[in-house]
Image: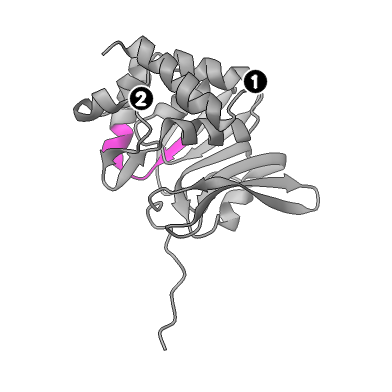
Amino acid sequence: MDFEVARANMIEQQIRPWNVLEIQTLEALAAVRREDFVPPAYRDLAFADVQIPLGGGEVMLEPKVSARMMEALHLGAGDRVLEIGTGSGYLTALLSRVCAHVTSVEINPELLGQARRNLGMAGIANVTLEEGDGHNGYGAPGSYDAILVSGSMARISDGLTRGLVTGGRLVGIEGFDPAMQAVLYLRTSSGVDRRTLFETSAPRLKNAEDAAEFIF
């Protein structure tokens, strides 16, 4: 497979038609070698419009979903970003190209080790990788300009939105199959605003338990 041709086709045939048009996002997608972040058994599917299994119930999101979630954060060069769910490190690498620093939290130590190797091979230095459970936030309140949650939750936790500075943005995936939605939270001086971005689906974050259902 010619990976450069496949990468260009991914951008033109999957990413742009999903209204991902910011130059910084497209340049990051062109620069980061997605094929190097995909498990070897799935390398031929690196640019396919599918979720790729990573083990432990985690996946790489479809390229267009990763790109649109990233673009919805409207990142600036000075932004401090928190990522919940490092996975293979691919989305971490994309984020790192358009902001000042990424703190990425992964609960699975094996995946974290793989991501560390992948990011090291890619020469990415403005990232801090942490092993831990970030579903209810990570770090002190008001620490981040943007937060990206790569797994789904029934609803984004208050602990996560508390991590945003005023004017900060959070993008995550909420709801229950088959009707999950990517959502944007914006912290304002008076509270937190929420709006729906698009329909999608993703595995649950570890320990992000759904509310108990009552059985009558």
Dot 1 or dot 2: first in sequence order is: 2
Whether 3 is drawn above or below 163: the answer is: above
Relative depth, front residue between 141 and 120: 120
Magenta stretch, residue numbers: 104-113
101 or 63: nearer the eye? 63
Residue 93, by quadrant, is top left
Residue 148 point in image, percent of width and height? 53, 39
Mark 2 lies on residue: 47
Q: Secondary structure at mark 1?
A: loop
Identify the residue at horizontal 69%, vertical 45% (top origin).
Answer: 186
Q: CA distance from mark 1 to mark 2?
A: 27 Å
Task: Tell me the tag on residue 87.
Answer: none
Q: Is residue 86 magenta?
A: no
- Residue drawn where x is 47% and y is 20% of the image: 11
Question: Which three-letter amino acid code belongs to the residue tagged 2?
Answer: Phe
Image quadrant in which you'd find residue 79: top right
Residue at image position (55%, 33%) is 68
Q: Nearer the viewer, mark 1 or mark 2?
A: 2
The amino acid at mark 1 is Ala
Quadrant of the rendering where the C terminus is positioned: bottom left
Residue 51 x %, y %: 35, 38
In this orientation, does residue 142 appear? Answer: no
Q: Which residue is mark 1?
A: 77
Quadrant including the N terminus:
top left
